[in-house]
Image (tube, grey):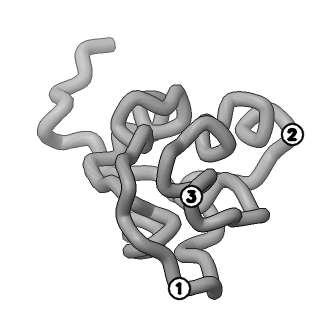
Amino acid sequence: MDVNLEEVTLMMVSMTPENNKKCLCGTCRTYLYNSLRSRVFCAFGKSEKPSQMKGCVCNSCPISIEYNLSGYYFCIKGAEE
């Protein structure tokens, strides 16, 4: 089956144990600098804690790649819709 990537609809990221293991949030400079606690912000949305941007690993995260996400700073900007 041939798939045109431009026609692929973005799937919503689901919170699963597998995605939790793949998540790179805990290695991110923004996550560490702001002492964030949650993970998988691409699924749950932004942190309730105000945060400063200090670098982002979202675009290199296996979850972003698997779900074809184009955003970044999900911990600050919220989940991709």
Q: SS for tag 1?
A: loop
Q: From the viewer's perspective, is residue 69 above or below residue 1?
A: below
Residues under labels 3 and 2: Cα distance? 25 Å
Left or right of 44? Residue 16 is: right
Give the label on residue 17, or none. 2
> Which residue appears at 16% of the width and 27% of the height?
4
Camera-side residue of 50 and 22:
50
Residue toward you, 54 or 42:
54
Residue that appears at 68% across and 43% down: 26
Picture residue at 40% right of the left edge, 29% below the top: 60
- Pointer 3 local density, CA inside 10 Å: few below 14, some 14–19, many at least 20: few
Measured from the top left, where is residue 36 in percent x and y? 69, 65
> Which quarter of the picture shows residue 22?
top right
The C terminus lies in which quarter of the figure? Answer: bottom left
Query: Tag 1: residue type?
Result: Pro
Task: Point out the tag, 3 or 2, that comes first from the N-terminus.
Answer: 2
Query: Does 27 sit left or right of 50 as displayed?
Result: right
- Disc 2 marks a residue whose amino acid type is Pro
Q: Position of residue 30 (x, y in %)?
A: 49, 56
Q: Which mark is on residue 73?
A: none
Residue 61 x/y as whole percent: 49, 32
Vertical relation: 39 (above or below) 61:
below
Residue under numbered circle 3: 33
Q: CA distance from mark 2 to mark 1?
A: 26 Å
| Residue 50, disc | 1
SS class, disc 2:
helix
**Amino acid identity at mark 3:** Tyr
Most foreground residue, 81 or 78? 78
**Above or below, comparing residue 55 to residue 21 in the picture:** below
